[in-house]
Amino acid sequence: MNKTNIHNKNKLIVASIAIVVALALIASPLVAMDNDAFATHKKGNKAKQSIEQSQSSNQNAGCVSGGTTFLSCNNLSLQHQKNTGNNALAQSGQGGNVGDQSISQSQSSSQTSNVVSGGDTIGSGNNINVQNQENSGSNAAAQS
């Protein structure tokens, strides 16, 4: 075979693959119309949807000093979670619907501080923990 025939054969193969892919993309919504996603009247729906946020802080500090211990062995933990999105779920079907939907936020902090000093311990061995959670989004579910 010469170069022109090989080139034309490759073009034919690529064109055939493109046609098969195009037909599959066009036909797939037609096949999917009987799916749960379209909420037909013959079937029920099951949906699980969640937004979860979690934070954890573990801090340990230990100081041993023969003299004054100043501003040492302090733990500081600042945690903030903000969710401004929405969590919406809608279902329709006669076969029964099951919906599980949640927005969950959790925070934890564990702090220990030990100071052994031969003098003053000014501003030392403090544990400070500030946590904030904010959810300004909505959580809506509808079923019929």
Image (spheres, helix red, strand yellow):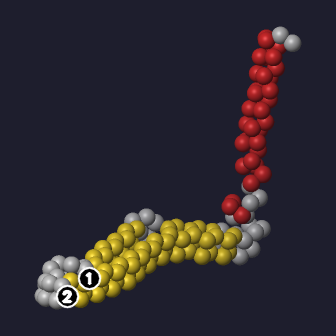
- Residue at horizontal 77%, vertical 16%? 7
**Chain-order first, disc 1 or disc 2:** 1
Residue positioned most to the front:
66
Count every numbered label the image shows and give the total. Answer: 2
Report the residue marked by disc 1: 63
* Discs 1, 2 touching: Cβ within 8 Å: yes
Report the residue marked by disc 2: 117
- Residue at horizontal 74%, vertical 48%? 28
Residue positioned most to the right:
1
What is the x, y in percent for residue 14? 76, 27
How far apart are the two marked residues, 1 and 2, measured between alpha carbons?
A: 8 Å
Q: Quadrant of the C terminus?
A: bottom right
Amino acid bearing label 2: Ser
Q: Secondary structure at mark 2?
A: strand
Q: Secondary structure at mark 1?
A: strand
Amino acid bearing label 1: Cys
* Viewer-proximal residue among 7 and 135: 7
What is the x, y in percent for residue 65? 21, 83
Q: Quadrant of residue 46?
A: bottom right
Q: Relative to 41, does residue 60 appear above or below in the rendering? A: below
Residue 141 seen in this snapshot: no
- Residue at horizontal 36%, vertical 75%? 133
